Amino acid sequence: MQFEVGQIVKLKKKHPCGSFEWEILRVGADFRLKCLGCGHQVMLKRTLVEKNCKGLREKE
């Protein structure tokens, strides 16, 4: 799967705010993701994002 900055990724588990969707802010060995529900930002390892990804779409 090809990940790019600005795409929206849908993960298997939801954030405590209730959102499943995250915006990709940084791509590399680690990803910086921003929750589309509350705006919280997290850093996750690439392998974890690839494993838990359910879908990928472009930002409107």
Image (cartoon, rainbow, N blue to C red):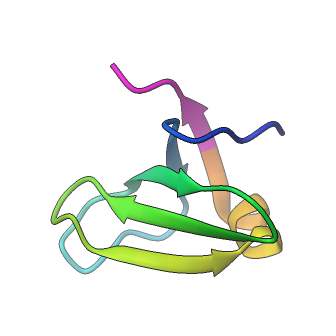
Please give left or right for residue 29 compared with residue 43 in the image.
right
Magenta span:
55-60
Q: Would residue 56 be counted in the magenta stretch?
A: yes
Q: Where is residue 50 in the image (x, y as percent from the top left)?
A: 77, 59
| Residue 47 in the image: above or below residue 7 | below
Q: Where is residue 6 in the image (x, y as percent from the top left)?
A: 49, 37
Q: In which quarter of the image is the N terminus?
A: top right
Count of marks, rendered view: 0
Residue 34 percent across, percent down from the top left: 37, 62
Q: Quadrant of residue 42?
A: bottom left
The residue shown at (26%, 73%) is 40
- Give the vertical position of 32 relative to 21 (above or below): below
Q: Is residue 60 left or right of residue 52?
A: left
Residue 12 horizontal side relative to residue 35, left or right:
right
Residue 12: which quarter of the image?
bottom right
The answer to whether residue 59 is above or below residue 44 is above
56 or 31, which is in the foreground? 31
Q: Does the magenta stretch include residue 48?
A: no
Quarter residue 49 falls in: bottom right
Which residue is located at x 73 percent, y 74 percent?
Answer: 48
Outermost residue to the top: 60
In percent of width and height, residue 11 lies at 53, 58
Instruction: Answer above or below: position of 11 versus 31.
Output: above
For the residue pair 45 and 5, the one nearer the viewer reads as 5
For the C terminus, the image quarter is: top left
Q: Residue at x 38, y 69 (%)?
A: 14
